[in-house]
């Protein structure tokens, strides 16, 4: 969040960093308002979590500033917090027994019912420049790192770029993605339930879930947004 006093001036996201900053060392000392999104969509502090989720899905946002009645910035809500909330909610629903709420279906619907994206694949010896260019070209926040046999051995996300690479590595072409990837990935088989998938994502703090076959290959990637869009449909039923 970028503030002007107590008021919100804009937001500066991991996507902004990946698109505008990480590849351009000459921008590292530039004012943040050069790249931020000004006058972002906000939500009032009395709104419910499901209202925040619907707003984020409708606008394709992953972060949403929360403001008070006077417009002062109070905080923000993001996908990571909603993942934990959804996993906790489904955990409590599983204890209610068979007098099922619509949400209880998420314990029995597996991930094959969700639209999975084709994974972006790179090898560990590929450069950070190659991996980040693949993200930007596909407008995606994750690349899967695979061995020569195609088995998944790691991942690089926009969050990794933000935490480990941005404003630290000035020659992306000279660095192998295998030296910067995350090896603790959020993964599940396509037959796993949505509730189990959310628990894995919550435990690891990931908003991407890699579908892994018995051979270790990745037939697809499911995002938290795709899960929550299904979640909205179930709750509205």
Image: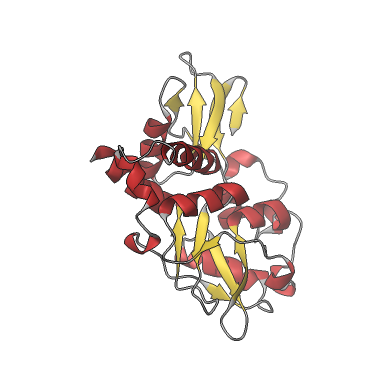
- How many numbered callouts? 0
Residue furthest out toward the left: 237
117 to 56, vertically: above or below = below
Q: Residue at x 39, y 46 (%)?
A: 228
* Quadrant holding the N terminus: top right
Q: Is residue 143 visible?
A: yes
Q: Would residue 189 be found to the left or right of residue 230 on screen?
A: right
Q: Nearer the viewer, residue 187 or 23?
A: 187
Q: Would residue 21 be found to the left or right of residue 224 on screen?
A: right
Residue furthest out toward the front: 97
Give the image location of residue 108, x and y in percent. Answer: 36, 53
Q: Nearer the viewer, residue 191 or 165?
A: 191
Q: Residue at x 63, y 81 (%)?
A: 147
The quarter of the displayed image where residue 236 is located = top left
Residue furthest out toward the bottom: 149
Give the image location of residue 42, x and y in percent. Answer: 44, 30
114 to 84, vertically: above or below = below
The quarter of the displayed image where residue 74 is located = top right
Q: How is the image coloured?
A: secondary structure
Q: Is residue 15 visible?
A: no
Q: Residue at x 29, y 41 (%)?
A: 102
Give the image location of residue 168, x and y in percent. Answer: 76, 56
Q: Residue at x 43, y 70 (%)?
A: 118
Q: Nearer the viewer, residue 141 or 196?
A: 196
Q: Would residue 154 be found to the left or right of residue 46 on screen?
A: right
């Amino acid at each position: 969040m970028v503030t002007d006093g107590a008021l919100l001036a804009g937001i500066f996201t991991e996507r902004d960093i990946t698109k505008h900053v990480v590849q351009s060392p000459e921008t590292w000392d530039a004012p943040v308002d050069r790249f931020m999104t000004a006058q972002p969509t906000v939500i009032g502090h009395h709104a419910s979590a499901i209202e925040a989720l619907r707003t984020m899905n409708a606008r394709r946002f992953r972060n949403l500033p929360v403001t008070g009645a006077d417009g002062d910035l109070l905080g923000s809500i993001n996908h990571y917090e909603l993942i934990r909330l959804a996993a906790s909610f489904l955990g409590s629903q599983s204890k209610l027994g068979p007098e099922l709420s619509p949400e209880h279906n998420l314990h029995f619907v597996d991930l094959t019912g969700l639209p999975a994206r084709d994974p972006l694949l790179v090898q560990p010896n590929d450069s950070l420049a190659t991996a980040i260019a693949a993200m930007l070209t596909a407008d995606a926040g994750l690349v899967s790192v695979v061995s020569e046999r195609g088995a998944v051995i790691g991942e690089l996300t926009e969050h990794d770029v933000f935490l480990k690479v941005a404003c630290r590595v000035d020659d992306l072409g000279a660095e192998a993605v295998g030296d910067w990837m995350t090896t603790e990935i959020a993964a599940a088989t396509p037959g796993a339930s949505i509730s189990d998938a959310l628990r894995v994502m919550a435990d690891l703090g990931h908003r991407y879930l890699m579908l892994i076959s018995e051979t270790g290959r990745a037939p697809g990637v499911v995002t938290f947004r795709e899960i929550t869009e299904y979640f909205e449909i179930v709750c509205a039923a």
